[in-house]
Amino acid sequence: MKRLWLATIVLSFGALGQQRDYGKVEIKATRVAGSVWMLQGAGGNIAVSVGDDGVVMVDDEFAPLVPKIKAALAKISQKPVRFLINTHWHFDHVGGNAGMADTAAILAHENVRKRMQAGAKILDMTIAPAEPRALPVVTYQHDVSIWLNGEPVRALHVAPGHTDGDTIVFFTRSNVVHMGDDFVTYGFPFVDLDSGGSVRGMIAAIDEVLPQIPPDAKIIPGHGPLSTVADVKKFRGTLDEIVALVARGLKSGKTVEQMQKEKLLAPYASWNGEFVKADDFIATVARDLQSKK
C-alpha cells in the first residue's frame, strides 16, 4: 500500500513539473495589499514585497520559468530581489533559486538546506542534490525577520506539517500571510511523510499561526487563489474531521484497504482532485497515525 501511495504521488509530481510545457506558462501578477503582490504560473504561489528598499520574494516555482518571473517582477518594480525565502524544499517552490541568486540572499529553515543538499529518491523519480548556488545561505531554527519596505517580513518555522522544514511568512504591515503548502486549495493536501511531514503536524501548524493572523488578513496559499482566514479555518476543520474518521477506523481494527473500499472519505468528494485522491489521503493519514511521531 505504501508503494502504491508513493507511485500516485510520483506521477502527480511529474505532471506538476517535469512534463510541463513551460513555454505556454504565463505569470499572472495580482496586487494583494500594501506592498505585497502574488505571482502565479506553475508550481507554488510566489509572494513579493516591493518598495524603495528592494524586493523580498517568497518561493520561485520552476527553474525554466525564471526569465518569465523576472519579466513579471520588472513590471512591478525596477528594484532588485534582495531576499528570497523558501517555504520548504520541494522543487516546485525552490526550482528557481539558482536563477534568482544573482541578486538575492536565500533564506530557509535549516532542514530545507539539508534536504536540498542531500537530494531524494521517491521510487523512480530522483531529485538530485541542488547546486551550491541554489542552496539557502541563511538558515534558522525558529524564525527570522527582514526589515524592508517599511515593514518586518517575518519567516516563522512551524511544526512539521507539509514537510519538516515548513515556513509561514507574515507581511505584517501589509496584513498578508503566505502559508506555504500547509494550506492549499486544490483538495486533499499532499503531506510528504518521507520529508518529515505529518497530517497531525499540519493541523498543529495551523493552530499555531491562526492566533497570530488578524481576522481580515489576506492569505496566499501554497497553491490556489487568494484566500481568507475563514478558508484556512475551514481547511483545518476538515483535516481534523478526516483524521478523526481514519483514527476511529484503525481503532476498530479496519485496514487501510477496508476504509478505502468503504469509501470512508466520500463526504469529502469535493476535495478529490487530480493531485491527491481520497484513497491516497486515507493511506497518508493512517500511516501518520501509526507512526511514532
Image: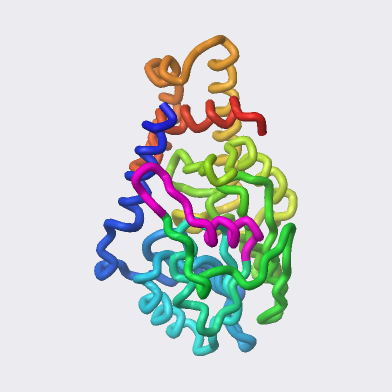
Q: Nearer the viewer, residue 80 or 129?
A: 129
Residue range (magenta):
108-126
* Residue at 52% from the left image edge and 78% from the top image edge: 101
Residue 240, horizontal then vertical, whole percent? 60, 32
Q: Which of 226 and 62 is in front in this view?
A: 62
Instruction: Using residue 257 as the reference point, say whether residue 169 is left or right of it.
Output: right
Q: Nearer the viewer, residue 99 or 127?
A: 127
> In the rendered view, would you say 113 is above or below 196?
below
Is residue 114 shown in magenta?
Answer: yes
* Residue at 74% from the left image edge and 54% from the top image edge: 212
Instruction: Using residue 10 as the reference point, say whether residue 149 is left or right of it.
Output: right
* Residue at 53% from the left image edge and 29% from the top image edge: 287
Residue 22, horizontal then vertical, whole percent? 29, 67
* Residue at 39% from the left image edge and 31% from the top image edge: 269
Residue furthest to the top: 252
Q: In which quarter of the image is the N terminus?
A: top left
Q: Quadrant of the C terminus?
A: top right
Q: Nearer the viewer, residue 213 or 261?
A: 261
Residue 218 in sight from this viewpoint: no
Is residue 113 shown in magenta?
Answer: yes
Residue 96, horizontal then vertical, whole percent? 45, 70
Residue 213, horizontal then vertical, whole percent? 69, 55
Identify the image quadrant of residue 142.
Answer: bottom right
> In the rendered view, would you say 230 is above or below 180?
above
Identify the image quadrant of residue 55.
Answer: bottom right
